[in-house]
Image: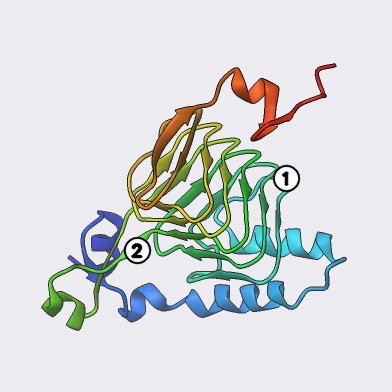
Amino acid sequence: MDNCKRREEGLIYHYDDPSIMDDQQHYQELLYEYNQTRPTENDKKLELLKQMFASMGEGCHIETPFHANWGGKHVHFGNGIYCNSNLTLVDDGDIYIGDQCMIAPNVVIATAGHPILPILREHHYVYTSEVHIDRNVWIGSGVQILPGVHIGENSVIGAGSVVTHDIPENVVAYGVPCKVIREIGEKDRIYYMKDKKLDVWE
């Protein structure tokens, strides 16, 4: 079985196989161009993202600088997604991000890892596992999301967390490793931050 097939089937594979890497530079060139855009060139940015990404919805924005192994080739964005600066996508595998998600600065979303066994790393083996982030998720600054993770709809991941396992919908989760702290509920209709009360209902 060749490395392309091994990768498709979720097996470990050689990441430096030319048959896998052939078009990586093309996407890296598009990413370079994206990072050279001016702050006001929003239409150009969106057009580049549509060329770079596997799928790209409407009304999305990624602040520069933006980093991605494959320039977004394996990334699937819904609508209305905002990503702050220094987003890093290790997109050797597929990344799915749903509508209206917000991603703070310095977030890393990784789909690739290396085997623990040293001889396998010496022989350039790697594996990938998809990441799924459902709609309306807020990822805090400095969060690290590891391969294979699924984050449920509406959840909030606190700053500095390392997400190693799935997080359900409608919860606040944080920590190293990240764990569920509480559900989102009535308290959040009263307070928007600690003891600061919402006035939008009045």
Q: Position of residue 192 (x, y in %)?
A: 69, 32
The C terminus, quarter of image: top right
Q: Position of residue 13 (x, y in %)?
A: 23, 69
Amino acid beneath label 2: Ala
Q: Residues within 10 Å of mark 1 (few under 14, many from 20)?
A: few
Q: Quadrant of residue 12?
A: bottom left
Q: CA distance from mark 1 to mark 2?
A: 27 Å
The residue positioned 37% from the left and 46% from the top of the image is 149
Disc number placed over residue 58 in the picture, else none: 1
Amino acid beneath label 1: Glu
The residue positioned 62% from the left and 73% from the top of the image is 31
Work out whether 139 lies above or below 45. Answer: above
- Between 169 and 41, the residue placed more toward the observer is 169
The residue positioned 60% from the left and 17% from the top of the image is 186
Say left or right for 41 vs 103: right
Q: Is residue 148 visible?
A: yes
- Between 172 and 164, the residue placed more toward the observer is 172
Say left or right for 88 vs 78: left
Work out whether 141 lies above or below 186. Answer: below
Q: Residues within 10 Å of mark 2 (few under 14, many from 20)?
A: some
Disc number placed over residue 163 in the picture, else none: none
Q: Quadrant of residue 91?
A: bottom left
The N terminus, quarter of image: bottom left
Q: Earlier in the sequence, mark 1 or mark 2?
A: 1
- Between 142 and 3, the residue placed more toward the observer is 142
Q: Report the label total.
A: 2
The residue positioned 36% from the left and 73% from the top of the image is 20
Helix, strand or loop at label 2? It is strand
Q: Which residue is mark 2?
A: 112
